[in-house]
Image (cartoon, rainbow, N blue to C red):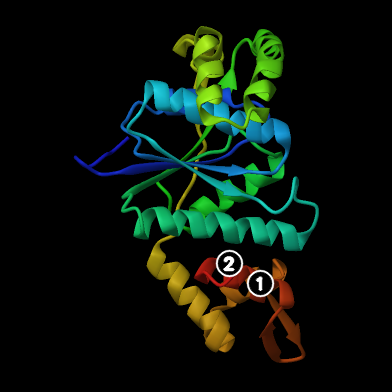
Amino acid sequence: MYHKPNEKTAVIAPIGTSPPVITAGIDAIDEPVSDLVLLSTQDEQVLAGCQVVSLGLKSRYPHIRVHFEYLPFDDISSDDENLKFMAIAARVIKKEREEFGCGRILLNVAGGRKNMCITLALLGQLLNVDGVFHIVNHEVKLFNQHLERIRPTMMRLFRTENEEEKSQIYHENQEMFEFMLFPPRNEYELIRIPTLPYPVSFISSLLSRVVFDPYTLNKEDCSLLLHHGILEQNGNNLYISDYGAKFLDVLVGKG
């Protein structure tokens, strides 16, 4: 992958109950990562995984800053929640670029709920990220057995309120944790999801025409936007649908 010298790279990833897909992804990218943002629900097992990932990376990659973005739901169960997730993810992508100065944005879609990962991958194309990746484990059955053996220790670490005690629990079980978090590279594959990012100028121009003068859209663009529910038509009148307005708000940062 092309990488400019001294360019900061952020990885953004939904996290579920299998935290190793996050840490294995950091290992497998094979380029310096400066920031990791975990999109997490409030589920206890997921939160426990966040803490273990944070401690594991602090031990192996202390230069990586780990950020958490907590979602207001455990799963996406409606169009509004899906748009809310998109808005959160879009805000995180823009924040990593503008506030933290990350020139490269990579998405790891191996963790979290399936619908979150699908939505994030599609959003990545629209916001012109630099890569979307998935992790596949060759020995998933054995991997899951080991994960379940260590889960009680993960939950004990999570429920311990004292930060020093958390670190102590991690270090007492460090070998077991790191065996889970950083499996040998030959046990899994990093798969690049094919994406074709949209040029920023095209998206900006399209949004401007949809919002301010949909009648300037060419026939093909107009037909596609009508078909996908962004625009609606009443006779000869074109207007943005309620869904389209919410979706466009996500893309321009108002969602």
Asked whether residue 191 appears in the rendered view, the answer is no
Q: Residues within 10 Å of mark 1 (few under 14, many from 20)?
A: some
Q: What amino acid is at disc 2?
A: Val
Residue at 73% across, 77% down: 242
Q: Secondary structure at mark 1?
A: helix
CB under 8 Å between discs 1 and 2 = yes
Residue at 73% across, 80% down: 232
Residue 12 sits above or below residue 31 on the image: below
| Apparent side of residue 102 relative to residue 145 in the rendered image (left or right) | left
Which of the 4 image quadrants contains residue 224? bottom right
Residue at 66% across, 61% down: 84
Residue at 65% across, 51% down: 71
Disc sitting over residue 54 in the figure: none
Identify the image quadrant of the N terminus: top left
Residue 226 sits above or below residue 90 on the image: below
Q: Residue furthest left?
A: 5
Residue 90 pos. (x, y %): 52, 58
Question: What residue is pinned by disc 1?
Answer: 246
Identify the image quadrant of the C terminus: bottom right
Residue 101 pos. (x, y %): 31, 53
Question: What residue is pinned by disc 2?
Answer: 250
Q: What amino acid is at disc 1?
A: Lys
Asked whether residue 80 appears in the rendered view, the answer is yes
Alpha carbons under labels 1 and 2: distance apart: 7 Å
Which of the 4 image quadrants contains residue 210? bottom right
Residue 123 pos. (x, y %): 55, 54
**Front residue of 111 and 54:** 54
Residue 24 sits above or below residue 109 on the image: above
